[in-house]
Amino acid sequence: MSLLALAVAAGVGPASAAPSGPTDSTRDTSLTAPKAVVLGIIEGVTEFLPISSTGHLLVAERIMDIGQSDSSKEAIDTFTVVIQIGAILAVLGIFRKRFVLMIDGALGKSPEGRNLLMALLVAFVPAAAIGVLLSSPIKDKLLRPWPVVGAWFVGGVIILVFVANQSKLRVISTKLSDVTIRQGLIIGVAQVLALWPGTSRSLVTILAALLLGLGLQAAVEFSFLLGFLTLSAATGYELLKNGSTLYDTFGWVNPLLGTVVAGIAAFISVKWMVSYLEHKPLTIFGWYRIGAASIVGILLATSVI
């Protein structure tokens, strides 16, 4: 829970930081520089770990009292999507060789690159299509603390059960380039489950890939590359739709600060996870989710947050 403890620390400080952007007297000043940094750290660390960035950001916003009014809710929702740019760039940098391979594939120079690109594009479609169709109902009904707590707990139990039975799985391929169109589609359908806030896109895509017979490293890499496509599309859509609202409400300095911090945190987080999973199972993430669900559930039930 150290990530949410950062939100507590940022939320108890003075709220008199100078507003960023145009000096409009009606500008919302709740997104101070320290709070933008904390949200950036939370986004970067959690985006590609199987613990749900959306859930952590939602709880952190509540703790720090950001975006809790009707006038700022849309802007903070946009901010928490836009700072994903940092995580997107981190993945682009870490897996740059994979992207070069896919570009070669698109140009007809690499069969392996073309196969990987096609599998990723097919995997991207289901969640993108359903996400656009159900965006409003999801925000209205599910983007709330209790649905997140439920998703955290269920996901944690699923991880522990999966790890306990992981030895029974048969590894069919350890090469990322061997992912088929069919496997990509199934992983993409699984990604739809992550539209429920708190579920974690990384969790469902990694588990789906492992169940299909991919080795752990290939499953993690495919999940991260699919995340690149999904996050890029979501961020671009949100900027076009509500970018002006974000700027009008919070200016550009603090949102940019949060984005840069998110990129640095995501780079460190992804490198750590790839290295960690070379020798360890997913167990730690299961217990973390259950712990987070329990603590936040108690805080909500007692009206502390």
Image (cartoon, helix red, strand yellow):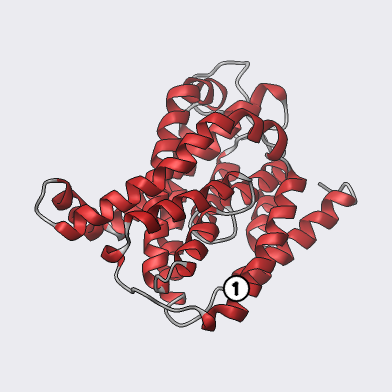
Residue 273: x percent and y percent? Answer: 46, 69
Q: What element does badge 1 sit on?
A: helix
Q: Quadrant of the N terminus?
A: bottom right
Which one is in front, 174 or 23?
Answer: 174
Up-down: is 269 above or below 199?
Answer: below
Identify which residue is drawn at 53% across, 50% down: 43
Question: Would residue 12 be visible to someone looking at this image?
Answer: no
Task: Work out which residue is located at the far front of the displayed protein and give it.
Answer: 182
Task: Work out which residue is located at the far top of the displayed protein and give it.
Answer: 25
Task: Work out which residue is located at the far right of the displayed protein and give it.
Answer: 302
Identify which residue is drawn at 46% across, 44% down: 84
Residue 88: x percent and y percent? Answer: 38, 48
Residue tagged by mark 1? 162
Residue 63: x percent and y percent? Answer: 73, 45
Q: Is residue 201 left or right of residue 260?
A: right
Label 1 neighbour load within 10 Å: few <14, some 14-19, many 20+: some
Quarter of image, res 225: bottom left
Q: Is residue 77 left or right of residue 178?
A: right
Instruction: Tell me which amino acid carries mark 1.
Output: Phe
Question: Would residue 69 be visible to someone looking at this image?
Answer: yes
Which one is in front, 109 or 268?
Answer: 109
Residue 209: x percent and y percent? Answer: 45, 64
Identify which residue is drawn at 32% across, 53% down: 119
Count of numbered tags: 1
Identify which residue is drawn at 69% across, 31% down: 140
Up-down: is 103 above or below 274?
Answer: above
